[in-house]
Image (cartoon, grey):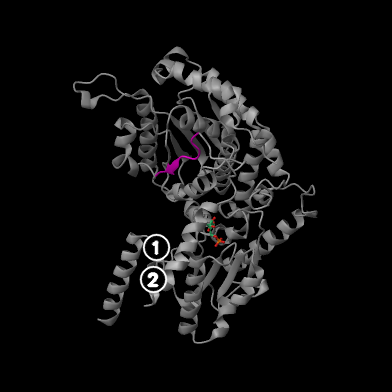
Amino acid sequence: MLSRVNPTQTKAWKALEAHAAATSDRHLRDLFAADPARFDRMHVRLEDLLLFDYAKHRVDETTLDLLAQLFEECGVAEGFRAQLQGAAINETEGRAVLHTALRSSSTEALLVDGQDVRPLIARERERMLAFAEAVRNGDVRSASGEKFKHVVNIGIGGSDLGPRMAVEALKPFAHRGIQLHFVANVDGADLHETLQLVDPARTLFLVASKTFTTQETMANAEAARTWLVQHLGDPGVVADHFAALSTNLAKVEAFGISAERTFGFWDWVGGRYSVWSSIGLPLAIAIGADGFRAFLAGAERIDRHAAEAPFRQNIPWLMAALGIWYRNFMGAATHAVLPYDQYLHRFAAFLQQMDMESNGKYLDRSGQRVTYATGPVVWGEPGTNGQHAFYQLIHQGTELIPSDFIASVVPQHPLHAHHAKLLSNFLAQTESLMMGRPEADSPFRVFEGNRPTSTLLFDALTPEALGALIAMYEHKVFAQGVVWNVFSYDQWGVELGKEMANVVLPELEGDGPIGAHDGSTTALIHHVRTLSSKALNS
Ligand code: F6P
C-alpha cells in the first residue's frame, strides 16, 4: 500500500519552502557563470538512447538534496516497489497497477489474487502479435478474400490516445500498405469523415474499449457495423471485418465478435496506461511484432532505470521532483511539453490524459481535501510551430511555465538540412529562455530569461525510444502522485459528466417534459430542441 504522508508535514517540505524564499531572486545565468561543471553534474546519459539535461533548472545542490529527501519521506521508492510487485495500490478501485508487467521480460512469478499473471500476459501478447503479423502479410483477409488496406481503431481516451500517438510517432517504421485510422469522438463527424476514406471490402475495424460500455465507442462501433453490412450486403461479414480489444469478454461476444478475434487484457491495466497491452494492436499492425517488442523493451529499460538509478541519475524521479518544485514552491500552474518532432505531434494530447486524469485530484489518500496544489495543466504543441504561436507568453508573459523540450539527433526522414534548422531552433529556445537578454535599446526587446527547461534529446526516435519516452512520463506521474498523496490510478472525476449526459440525452431526443436542471441548462435544452426540430422538418 502507499503511505498516507501529508507532504506539507515533512521536514523536506518545510525546508524547501524556506529554501525557495531564500533563493527566489537567483538567476540561472549566474548559476551557470559560477559553475562551469554544472552541465556535467546535471545531466543523465542513457547510452544509445537519450540524454536528459536538467542543468537549465532553477535548482542547486541543496534544492536537489531536499527534493530527494522529500521523495524519501513520502515513500516514493517503496511505493514503486509495491506497484511493481502487484500490490493493490489503486485502492479506490481495489486493483493492482501492473502496466509494467506487460513489458517485463522477467519469468519470476507475479501474483495477482493468487494467480501468476506472467503466462496470461505472454499468451495474450503472442496472440495479438500473431494477429498483427497476419493482417500485415495477408494471412488474415477480408470477407471477399482481399488483403486489408485500412484499419479503423474505434476507441476513446486511453483506448485511442496511446495507440494513435504511437502510430503517428513511428510512422517511418510502419507498413505503408496499410492505412491506420482512429475514430474517437461521439461527434458523428469523426466516423462519417473516416468512412469516406475507406473501402468497406478492405477495412478491418478494431473496437478498443476496456469496459466495452463507453458511450462514444459503442455508438461508433454500432454505426460502423451497420455501415459495413449495408455496403457488403451480408451480416456474416462482421466476423471477418471486426476485432475487439477489451477486458469485457461477455460484452464483446454480445456485440458479435468471436473469441478468436478478441484480444484481452485485465482490470489491473489502467486505460491511460494500456498501450502496452492488446490496446497496442494498431501499433503492432503498423510496425510489426518485432517493432512492438522493441517498443516494450524501451519501456522495460526505463522501468529498471527508475527502480535502480540513484536520485541524481534517475530521469523520471528528477522530472517528477522538478515538477513539484515549480508547482508547489514557485507557483507554476502549467507545464509545457514541446516536442521538436512532427512525428510526436499527438504526444502532448496523450500526456494530458496520462497526467491530468492521474493527478488532477483534490482529495488525498485519506479522503481529505489537500491544502497544496496537485497536478498542473499539461499542454503543448510541436516546435517550431509553437514558436510562432504561444512562445511569446513563455518568454515574456507573467506565468512561469517550466517546459520539456524533446527532440532527436538523427531524423527519420531524408531532409537533413531541415533537421539542422529544427535543432538550431530547439537549442536556441532553451538557451534564450534561460539566458534572456538583459540589455536592449528598448524595454520591449529585453528578455528576463530564467525560464526553466528540461532537454530530452534522443539519439533517434525509434520504437525503443518511444517506449522509453512514455515510460519516463508514466513514472514521473506516479512519483508526483505519491508525493501529492493522491490516488493516481482512479478517475472518479470523469463520472459525473457521463451520468448527466445520460439524463440529458432522452430530454434532447424526445418532446416530453424536461427534468430538474438549473435555469441555464433548461433554457439551452429548449433552444436545442426547438432548432433541431425546425432543422429536421425543413
Ligand atoms: O472517460 C474516461 C475513461 O474512463 C478513461 O479513463 C478511459 O481511458 C476511457 O474512458 C475509455 O474507456 P474504455 O476503454 O473502457 O472505453
Q: Position of residue 253 (x, y in %)?
A: 64, 75
Q: Residues within 10 Å of mark 2 (few under 14, many from 20)?
A: some
Q: Residues within 10 Å of mark 1 (few under 14, many from 20)?
A: few
Mark 2, secondary structure of its residue: loop
Q: Majority secondary structure of the magenta segment?
A: loop
Whether 524 is drawn above or below 457: the answer is: below
Q: Quadrant of the C terminus?
A: bottom left
Q: Residue furthest front?
A: 516
Q: Amino acid at mark 2?
A: Ile
Q: Position of residue 129 (x, y in %)?
A: 64, 61
Relative horizontal placement of residue 409, taking residue 287 as reference (left or right): left
Q: Quadrant of ligand 1?
A: bottom right
Q: Quadrant of the N terminus?
A: top right
Whether 186 is drawn above or below 142: the answer is: above
Range of residues picked out in magenta? 372-380
Please indicate, yes or no, whether residue 312 appears anywhere in the rendered image.
no
Any atom of ligand 1 within 8 Å of the CB at mark 2?
no
Please indicate, yes or no, whether residue 313 appears anywhere in the rendered image.
yes
Q: Amino acid at mark 1?
A: His
**Residue marked by disc 2:** 514
Asked where in the image residue 484 lies, by quadrant, the reply is top right
Residue at point 48% right, 51% down? 169
Which label belongs to residue 234?
A: none
Whether 378 is among the magenta residues is yes
Q: How many marks?
A: 2
Which label belongs to residue 517?
A: 1
Whether 132 is drawn above or below 100: the answer is: below
* Marks 1 and 2 in Cβ contact (< 8 Å): yes
Asked where in the image residue 120 lies, by quadrant, the reply is bottom right
